[in-house]
Image: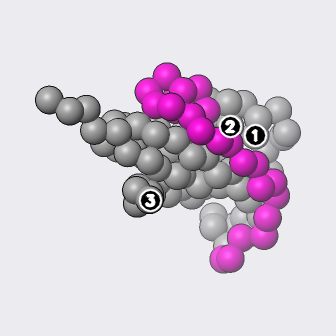
């Protein structure tokens, strides 16, 4: 049986009202979760950006883009962790097409 490994990218937005330490701790938490379940390719912190629309009275968020390869079942777990993590206001996981 061939093991299926896909390429993914995820963007998550952290509540920008958090302290720098709290933001970095959240990024590390997500990074280590990905590292322990997948192959981390890159982490790109875009920093504080204005949100396209207000989310829970917030107008700014701290954006982070992560590229990784994983088995097809991991993104569901990542989505679950995003959903229960305080401070993450939006997230998306996208399967990238193979070149």
Viewer-nearest of discs 1 and 3: 3
For this orientation, the residue located farthest to the bottom is 53
Res 23 label? 1
Residue 49 percent across, percent down from the top left: 79, 64
Q: Which residues are magenta?
A: 31-53
Q: Residue at x 50, y 31 (%)?
A: 39
Up-down relation of residue 40 to residue 45 (above or below):
above
Position of residue 95 measured from the top left corner of the image (x, y, whole percent): 41, 55
SS of the residue at dot 2? helix
The disc at residue 27 is 2
Does 87 lie within the magenta span? no
Q: Are the residues at dot 3 and dot 2 in contact (C-beta closer than 8 Å)?
A: no
In this orientation, does residue 75 appear?
A: yes
Q: Look at the magenta stretch and give its main secondary structure.
A: strand
Element under disc 3: loop
**Cα distance between the residues tagged 1 and 2:** 6 Å
Label whose residue precedes the other's in the sequence (1 or 3)? 1
Relative to 38, is 20 on the left or the right? right
Quick check: 81 above or below 99? Answer: above
Q: Position of residue 50 (x, y in %)?
A: 78, 70
Query: Label 3 belongs to which residue?
Result: 99
Q: Residue at x 44, y 27 (%)?
A: 37
């Amino acid at each position: 049986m061939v093991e299926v490994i896909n390429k993914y990218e995820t963007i998550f937005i952290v509540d920008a009202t958090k302290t720098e330490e709290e933001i970095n701790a959240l990024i590390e938490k997500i990074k280590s979760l990905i590292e322990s379940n997948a192959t981390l390719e890159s982490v790109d912190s875009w920093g504080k950006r204005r949100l396209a629309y207000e989310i829970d009275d917030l107008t700014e968020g701290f954006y982070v883009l992560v590229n990784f390869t994983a088995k097809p079942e991991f993104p569901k777990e990542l989505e679950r962790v995003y959903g229960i993590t305080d401070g993450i206001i939006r997230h998306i996981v996208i399967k990238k097409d193979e070149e």
